Structure formats: C-alpha cells, structure tokens
Image: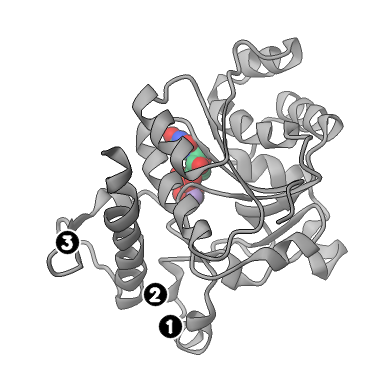
Amino acid sequence: PVSDQAFVTLATNDVYCQGALVLGQSLRNQRLTRKLVVLITPHVSSLLRVVLSRVFDEVIEVNLIDSADYIHLAFLNRPELGVTLTKLHCWTLTRYSKCVFLDADTLVLSNIDELFERGEFSAAPDPGWPDCFNSGVFVFQPSLETHGLLLQHATDHGSFDGADQGLLNSFFSSWSTADIHKHLPFIYNLSSNTAYTYSPAFKQFGSSAKVVHFLGSRKPWNYKYNPQTGSVLEEGSELVTQHQASFLKVWWGIYHGSILPLYE
Ligand code: UDP
Ligand code: MN
C-alpha cells in the first residue's frame, strides 16, 4: 500500500454522501492500495459521519466560514462559489504527495491505480465541450501554494460556469494543448448519458469503461430499485438507455448489498 497517496471525494450533504459511500465501496472492491478520503461540510449529519467512517480512512470536515481569512474573504465575495471553493479544499491535503479526486456521483468499475502515474493537472475531456476537461475526475498534487492561487483566481475572475469546472479550466488553461499525458482517456470519466449520443463508439469502447460519471441533474439515488429483480425503475417517461441502466444496476447493487447494511 502507498500511504502518501489518496483517492479523494466530497459530500456537502447527506444526499451526496450516498454517492460518496458507493464510490468509496466501489474503490474498495478493486484491490484498494491508496488511502480513501472524503471531505464533508458541517451540514452532514452525525449518522452519516459514522457510516462514512466505515468506508473511508479519513472523514475530514472543512468549514469555509471558520477557515483562514483569505478563504473567508473569497467566500464572502463570491457566495455562489460555495461548493466550488469546498472542492478546492482538496489541495490542502498536504500529507499526501499526490491524489486522484472523484466526484461523489462517479462509480469505479476496475482498478485505476495507474492514474497515480500521471502528473498535475490530468483530467478527461468534457463530453459537452471537449476542449475543456471535465472536473469530475482529476489527478492533482496537494499544495497550500496552489490552493492559495486557486482561491485568488476565484475571487479575481469568478468561474465562467459558476462552478468548479469553469474555475479549474481557466486556471489550468494550458490543459487542452500543452501535454497529451495530461489528457486522461475518456474511459476514466465516461459520462453515463454520452453513450446515447455516440453509440457506435460506446459499442466499440464502452466495455473498457473504468470510471462512470452520472453527471447531470438525475443522479443514481434519484431512481428506485427493486432488490428482488435487481432492476432500476425509471420515474416518469424519461428515457434510460441500456448502458445507463446497466451502470445504474451496478450502483444500486453496491448500495443495497454493501452500504445499507452499514447502517445497522
Ligand atoms: N457536491 C456536493 N454537494 C452538492 C453539490 C455537489 O457535495 O450539493 C459535490 C459532489 O462531490 C459532486 C460534485 O460536488 O459530485 C460536483 O457536483 P455534481 O456531480 O452534482 O455536478 P455534475 O457532475 O453533474 O456537473
Ligand atoms: Mn459529477
């Protein structure tokens, strides 16, 4: 095991904690060799903190309001960047030399230790605008200096999409041209709904997916699950593609089989 490297995620409320728990368990299911860290905020309930501590090595509360003055300032000047600035907190984890950040709405399907061979800042293209990276999965190097520069950038320039992805793309603006090694293959951040827009590519490459990202407004925990049949139920008339349904099944299988029992 490599104890100075970690997988890191973020959950600012009990709902996103469900995603973080499944993500953490999905990493544990793949011969975990790095530490597992979840950042939470004060809103997360004490029950969820206990459950998180059964899956993660470290549950770290970050509280923007109580943080150093410059964070406080950044937060007051740009309150809309709340969750975004919270994500940036991952750069303060300086007891780790290198980390992989994963959104709480991602799911790991096979071992991804090879990501630690990449340098900062590595990420996969965004399916909606491939000259930008998607900030749901990225390799970074904790550093208080970088953290400070990121916060400074946030207060000076804001974020063009109001969230972390816009901010990180304008900060790491050479990503799209400077170094191809920093472009993670799409299989490390496969958006669960992109399969629908380019289905021949999905047929060719989809089975090699290593990380699935349920990006967008409908998250796995918004669906219903029938544990008897193992099927995920759609709500309303929304179309769920076959690939999407199979990824949702994996998510719910882990939630039902490994996470719910932790509440007992
Ligand atoms: N997040 C959170 N609480 C929120 C919204 C977001 O903890 O209320 C965290 C969580 O880790 C989430 C990430 O920020 O995965 C990015 O948000 P989201 O995944 O909803 O955005 P999308 O990937 O759909 O653009
Ligand atoms: Mn996401």
* Residue located 80% across and 45% down the image: 141
Could you say where residue 34 lies in the image, as x and y percent from the top left? Answer: 66, 53
Foreground: 99 or 263? Answer: 263
Report, in whole angstroms, how far the alpha carbon at label 1 lies from the one at label 3.
29 Å
Q: Quadrant of residue 194?
A: bottom left
Q: Is residue 87 above or below residue 186?
A: above
Q: Nearer the viewer, mark 1 or mark 3?
A: 3
Residue ID for mark 3: 227
Q: Amino acid at mark 3?
A: Pro
User: Looking at the rendering, in which quadrant would you find the N terminus?
Assistant: bottom right
- Residue on which the image places disc 1: 199
Q: Are marks 2 and 1 in contact (CB under 8 Å)?
A: yes
Return the residue nearer the eye: 23 or 234: 23
Q: Secondary structure at mark 1?
A: helix
x and y percentages locating residue 148 in the rendered image = 80, 27
Helix, strand or loop under label 3: loop
Q: Position of residue 111 (x, y in %)?
A: 59, 68
| Amino acid at circle 1 | Ser
Specify the label residue 196 is tagged with: 2
* Distance between the alpha carbons at the discs numbered 2 and 1: 6 Å
Q: Residue at x 68, y 36 (%)?
A: 90
Three-letter amino acid code at disc 2? Tyr
Whole-percent x, y for residue 71 in the image: 70, 18
